[in-house]
Image (cartoon, rainbow, N blue to C red):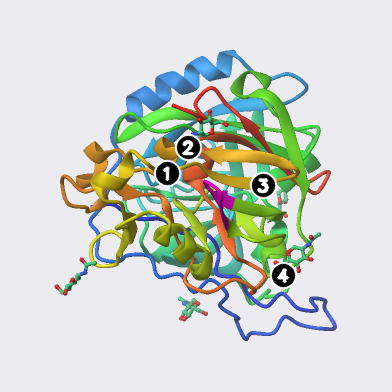
Amino acid sequence: MAVISLRTLVVLAIASVSVANPVTTNAVTKLALDPVKGRTGAYMHGAPDADRARAQLHKSRGSGGATTIPATNLAYVQYTASIGVGSPATYYNLVVDTGSSNTFVGTGKKYVKTKTSIPTGQEVNVTYGSGYFSGYEYLDQVTIASGLVITNQSIGDALEYADFEGVDGIIGVGPVDLTLDTLYPDVNAQIPTVMNNALEQKLISTEVLGVSFAPADSYSDTNGALTFGGIDDSLYIGEITYTPVTATEPAGYYWGINVTGATYGTTTVIPGSYAGIVDTGTTLIYIADNWYSTYQESIPGAYYDSNDTGLIVIPESSVASLENFTFQIGGVEHVLDPAAQLLPQDQNTAWGGKPGLQYGYIGPLGSNSGEGLDFIIGQKFMERFYAVFDTANERVGFAYTDHTFS
Ligand SMILES: *[C@@H]1O[C@H](CO)[C@@H](O)[C@H](O)[C@H]1NC(C)=O
Ligand SMILES: *[C@@H]1O[C@H](CO)[C@@H](O)[C@H](O)[C@H]1NC(C)=O
Ligand SMILES: *[C@@H]1O[C@H](CO)[C@@H](O)[C@H](O)[C@H]1NC(C)=O
Ligand SMILES: *[C@@H]1O[C@H](CO)[C@@H](O)[C@H](O)[C@H]1NC(C)=O
Ligand SMILES: *[C@@H]1O[C@H](CO)[C@@H](O)[C@H](O)[C@H]1NC(C)=O
């Protein structure tokens, strides 16, 4: 069975943060999701493939100070990248997460301290939509690629943790605000992210992350690419459509955007402009429960499997008549065709499902719309669209790819 990851940090009340105005310790839990529990581990396979792909990509560095590294679609539910820590570097398979901002190691392979590892004396503790970790914070050298070696990056050494089976930690590429209230005793400290430090140390020329994911052909498929410091024009087709990060909270604490609507066929599912988040660390595409009901009721016989998988089940008789699910983002239609909504049936067992059933990727968020975080555009959307996380211009971009419809 597989973990449906929700690496997204459970958002804290980031109200009025300053030295004079300490962060409230009352954590407001906004993400009321209930990821399916009781799964077994997904241990890393295919590491040699990842290493070969990494060597290839190192040879084809992006232009303009941008660096592209490979990313692995692991167990269909998360993307990892091989990131070095220390000198000499130990390589860790870290979940690529735009929904949180702390970087840490130790949940699989233990943190190997070297001469570059400097203890900060701080404890660190982060709770995610699924899982948590706590331990001690260090400064250390982080190697993203041979030409992208960050010094004095703050990283956590996870000593206690849950729900990180098969991976060694997280590389958190969300907004830096999400690191507030994760250290102790420095609860008011923001921890510069790897993106912040890469810019500060002039290793990248702009704080932009380009993300290329694709549907996996196998349990561990190194089919993704991350571009630090720019975008890779070879990984999408047409234009990138940008939309500003949202001012609506709590979506705005994350990589939050407004969509201006969504339809299933000719049925309106999202009836206007609403805020939500774009999160590589969430596996599925979640929409507010009332919108999900509209979607499910539009598919004859569809139901929600809360027992085994936490996925929609679509009767075989309705599969042939499935329609497009279309998000309106930045004035452009982003179409998830029927195939993009469906779990390939040969993956059913890996997801804890029953053979022969047809499961789908669009699920209920766990609360109705109107809460300022009404959808999560997760990994399964980004397997179809190239994504750009542009801190410099406070915007998120999407583009069609050669695997949007496949
Ligand atoms: C980490 O934080 C959570 C939530 O605030 C708390 O329940 C837990 O006790 C903390 N764990 C450690 C080890 O500090
Ligand atoms: C890293 O930080 C430590 C402690 O703040 C400092 O002594 C050291 O010079 C820094 N190293 C680099 C390469 O900036
Ligand atoms: C974004 O969506 C929220 C509702 O989630 C709405 O209140 C806000 O006005 C929208 N912002 C824009 C710029 O449309
Ligand atoms: C879930 O399990 C319960 C108890 O076995 C059963 O009554 C129910 O029909 C199941 N629901 C679904 C959607 O399979
Ligand atoms: C989905 O949209 C694509 C692109 O617009 C179109 O080619 C295709 O026919 C649509 N599929 C369905 C089932 O409507």
| Relative side of 90 to 246, left or right | left
Residue 335 x/y as whole percent:
56, 38
User: Which amino acid type corresponds to the residue marked 3 in the rendered image?
Assistant: Gln
- In the image, residue 127 sits, relative to residue 232, either above or below, namely below
In primary-sequence order, the first of circles 1 and 4 is 4
Residue at point 42%, 64% (across, down): 130
Distance in Å between CA atoms under marks 1 and 4:
28 Å
- Residue at the image point whose x is 45% and y is 20% from the top: 53
Decide which of tag 4 and tag 3 comes sooner along the chain: 4
Which mark, residue 249? 4
Q: In this view, does 146 lie to the left or right of 92?
A: right
Q: Earlier in the sequence, mark 3 or mark 1?
A: 3
Q: Is residue 100 visible?
A: no
Residue 264 among those drawn in magenta: yes
Amino acid at the residue labelled 1: Gln
Name the mark nearer the viewer: 4 or 3: 3
Residue at mark 2 = 337
Residue at mark 2 to residue at mark 4: CA–CA distance: 30 Å
Amino acid at dot 2: Asp
